[in-house]
Image: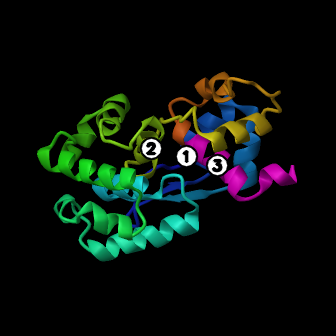
Amino acid sequence: MTISPNRQNQLTFSMHGIEMQTLRQADERLSWLIDRVGELTIVLNPDPFQSLALSIVGQQLSVKAASTIKERVRALAPEFTPEALLAIDADTLRAAGLSRAKSASIHDLSSKALSRELDLDRLEEMDNEEIIRMASAVKGIGRWTAEMFLMFSLGRPDVLSVGDFGLQRSTKWLYRMEDRPDKKYLEQHGHKWEPYRSAASFYLWEAINRGIIDQA
């Protein structure tokens, strides 16, 4: 598996790299899933500010509804910069479909980006937990959103979102686990996937996307 952003801002997971070999050797059940899925490509959003802003817009919405509202917000601010979004008043954002809370979050994100409290120019120097703490200081951004940012914008290779429902569901299925009230399915197996836990996560999500869970 080769994990390297290319000019199309993608992560490509091929079957012959050292990372894929490591995962397959470390975990028999995950190896089965990797073989079932095959090569995998993940599209990234390389613009960190845009990625965070769109994450806020899309929270707790269906894919279709989120797409519609994102396009409305883009129409209001085609350049999609902190300055442009901060200049849009809350009533206009709400008219585009954002809730009062999301409008406040967009303004807080924009303000913190401009003040460098959210220092998006330092991301390459920061470790995952530093970025999570910094991003979580923005209204409306919690740990899960910050973890998705690490994976789908920054392409960080070793992120495991233990609170993600899809990953919990897929892990429970893959390892044939009994119901747990605490939902700690990932904690039992995730240590085997270090330092490529993001790759394992992408394959676990793909099992849901392709309906493999329902077929097996």
Q: Which residue is mark 2?
A: 145
Q: Quarter-wise, where is residue 37 in the image?
A: bottom right
For marks 3 and 2, give the CA distance: 16 Å
Q: Is residue 67 magenta?
A: no
Q: Position of residue 60 (x, y in %)?
A: 53, 52
**Span of residues in magenta:** 199-216
Q: Nearer the viewer, residue 161 or 216?
A: 161
Mark 3: secondary structure = helix
Tell me which numbered mark, 1 or 2, is placed earlier along the sequence.
Answer: 1
Dominant SS type (magenta): helix
Task: Look at the numbered disc 2 and give the secondary structure of its residue.
Answer: helix
Name the residue type under label 1: Gly
Of circles 3 and 2, the one toward us is: 2
Q: Position of residue 189 (x, y in %)?
A: 67, 26
Residue bearing the label numbered 1: 17
- Viewer can see residue 208: yes
Say which of 139 and 67 sits in front: 139
At label 2, which amino acid type do we have? Thr
Q: Which mark is residue 205?
A: 3
Q: Is residue 6 left or right of residue 185?
A: left
